Amino acid sequence: MNSWRFFKRIWFATAPLAVWGAHFLFCYVLVAVQCTVTRTQSTLPLWLATALGAGICGSMLWQARSALRGDADLASQVRAVAALLAAIAITWSAFPLLLLDGCG
């Protein structure tokens, strides 16, 4: 039974990085499908995915805010740092996608 608690804590700490990975995968697959199938690109889904991903990471950071004050366990501290890094990574990896003019 204790092993389930361990895996739950690991998932709690690494969930922001999974959100970033899902955002990265969604955006690049969407651009590839749009340019291959329809030969046109709509940036609206990319904007929405970026806002959603950054919002989810912001929510996780808000939930782990006690870790920023230093009065939390290690998993909460890791989640706070991972949420901050994932929010930065989501916005950083979205810049090339959001600046696309179309399929070339």
Image (spheres, helix red, strand yellow):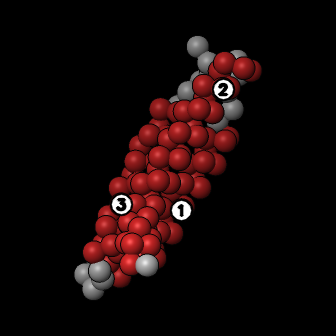
CA distance separating discs 1 and 2: 25 Å
For this orientation, the residue located farthest to the right is: 38
The N terminus - image quarter: bottom left
Mark seen at residue 78: none
Cβ atoms at labels 1 and 3 below 8 Å apart: no
Residue drawn at 66 percent across, 26 percent down: 33
Position of residue 89 measured from the top left corner of the image (x, y, whole percent): 40, 48
Position of residue 83 measured from the top left corner of the image (x, y, whole percent): 40, 62
Quarter of the image where one finds residue 46: top right
> Circle 1 is placed at which residue position?
56
The C terminus - image quarter: top right
The amino acid marked with disc number 3 is Ala
Quarter of the image where one finds residue 4: bottom left
Q: Residues within 10 Å of mark 3 (few under 14, many from 20)?
A: many
> Circle 2 is placed at which residue position?
33
Q: Secondary structure at mark 3?
A: helix
Q: Decide if residue 92 is on the left or right side of residue 70.
A: right
**Is residue 79 placed above or below 54 in the rendered structure?**
below
> Circle 3 is placed at which residue position?
82
Residue drawn at 40 percent across, 60 percent down: 14
The amino acid marked with disc number 1 is Ile
Q: Decide if residue 15 is on the left or right side of residue 73.
A: right
**Is residue 101 placed above or below 22 in the rendered structure?**
above
